[in-house]
Every structure is written in C-alpha cells, then in structure tokens.
Image (tube, rainbow, N blue to C red):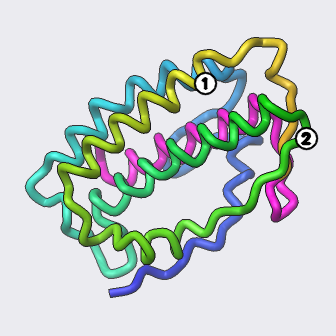
C-alpha cells in the first residue's frame, strides 16, 4: 500500500515548539543537538528491534522499520549538508523527496537488522559532525533549492526535530 506523500513545509518548527512531539528549538546549539542525537540512538535501536517493526499502524503511516530507514537517511543527508555549509558559506543543496527515496530504496521491505546497524553508524557519524562544529561557524548559511534558508544552528535544530519527531511517531 502506498503512503500519501508528506507535502508540509516543516521549517516552522524553527520558530515554535511542535505540538505533536513537544520539540522546542529554542537556544539549541549544534553541540546540544549532538548530545540529544546520542540520547536517541538506544531508543531507535530498541524500536527497530521490536517484533512488530514491519507493522504499519494504519494504511497511511510508515512502520517503525520505514521510519528508521528514513532517519538513517536523514543522518547521512544532514551530515552531508552540514559539511557543505562548513565548507562554503552560502552553500546550496537540493530539496529532498523523502517519499520518492522510500519507494526507490523499498523501505518497507528492508532487512531490520541492516537498518538497525546502519542507523547506529550514520547516527554516530552525524552526532560527531554536529559535536565538532566550532562556534565561529554557527552563522554560516545554506540555501535549500526550494528557497528555505538555514544557518548551521537552524539546520542542526531542523535536523534534530526530524529525528526526535519520528521517534515519537514510532513510540520509541
């Protein structure tokens, strides 16, 4: 069964707390983001180890496996974007079609143990990348192809919301 694509612009989470998951972006630094990513990793590992990891709660919602694979990709994607912004102030990067990626990579039929291991690996790499950001680079800018503007700080906050929100989605 196909999932309806998410077409929301989630950048609003940079301005106010998320009413669904409770995420509050206020005053988080990249180092805070790294610490909180580290706190999510055992929870993601637990969610991906559940017996019902492949079960979708309803026809329009991903399973824990699909969300986990997505977050694995989020870790990789945002580490790459962070690298671009640290390498070039004003870096540009393409918008990402997460739904097309889910279909192309067949998230629903992935091996849970592979996703579990890769999420842990990519999460650790992302954590370390955000932890290493020097304060002098916090204001470096990036522009997503859809026009969304970020600084290193707002990119870190936006990234963390995705990770924590999906953990909330899977009750992890």
Residue 9 relative to residue 74: left or right: right
x 25%, y 64%: residue = 110
Neighbour class for label 2 at 10 Å: few (<14), some, many (≥20)?
A: some
* Coordinates of residue 118 in the picture (x, y in percent): 33, 44
x 49%, y 81%: residue = 4
Whether residues under marks 2 and 1 lie with C-beta atoms below 8 angstroms apart, the answer is: no
Judged from this view, the residue extending furthest toward the top is 135
* Coordinates of residue 17 in the picture (x, y in percent): 64, 40
Check the picture and name the quadrant holding the C terminus. top left
Q: Nearer the viewer, residue 52 or 94?
A: 94
Check the picture and name the quadrant holding the N terminus. bottom left
x 87%, y 59%: residue = 147
Residue 77 relative to residue 165: left or right: right
Q: Which residues are magenta?
A: 144-172
Neighbour class for label 1 at 10 Å: few (<14), some, many (≥20)?
A: many
Relative vertical location of residue 34 with respect to residue 95 in this rendering, above or below? above
Upstream in sequence: badge 2 or badge 1: 2
* Coordinates of residue 112 in the picture (x, y in percent): 20, 55
Q: Secondary structure at mark 2?
A: loop
Q: Nearer the viewer, residue 151 or 164?
A: 151
By secondary structure, the bulk of the magenta-drawn segment is best described as helix
Q: Residue 150 magenta-drawn?
A: yes
Judged from this view, the residue extending furthest toward the left is 51
Q: Which residue is mark 2?
A: 90
Relative vertical location of residue 132 with respect to residue 5 in this rendering, above or below? above
Q: Which residue is mark 1?
A: 130
């Amino acid at each position: 069964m196909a999932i309806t694509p998410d077409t929301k612009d989630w950048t609003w989470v940079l301005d106010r707390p998320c009413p669904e998951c409770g995420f509050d972006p206020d005053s988080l630094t990249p180092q805070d983001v790294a610490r909180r990513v580290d706190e999510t990793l055992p929870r993601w590992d637990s969610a991906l180890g559940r017996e019902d990891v492949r079960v979708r709660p309803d026809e329009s919602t991903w399973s824990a496996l699909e969300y986990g694979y997505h977050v694995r990709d989020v870790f990789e994607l945002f580490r790459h974007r962070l690298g671009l912004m640290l390498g070039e102030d004003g870096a540009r990067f393409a918008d990402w079609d997460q739904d097309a990626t889910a279909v192309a990579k067949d998230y629903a039929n992935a091996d849970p143990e592979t996703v579990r291991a890769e999420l842990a690996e990519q999460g650790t790499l992302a954590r370390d990348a955000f932890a290493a950001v020097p304060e002098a680079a916090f204001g470096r800018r990036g522009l997503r192809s859809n026009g969304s503007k970020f600084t290193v700080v707002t990119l870190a906050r936006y990234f963390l919301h995705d990770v924590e929100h999906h953990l909330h989605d899977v009750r992890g």
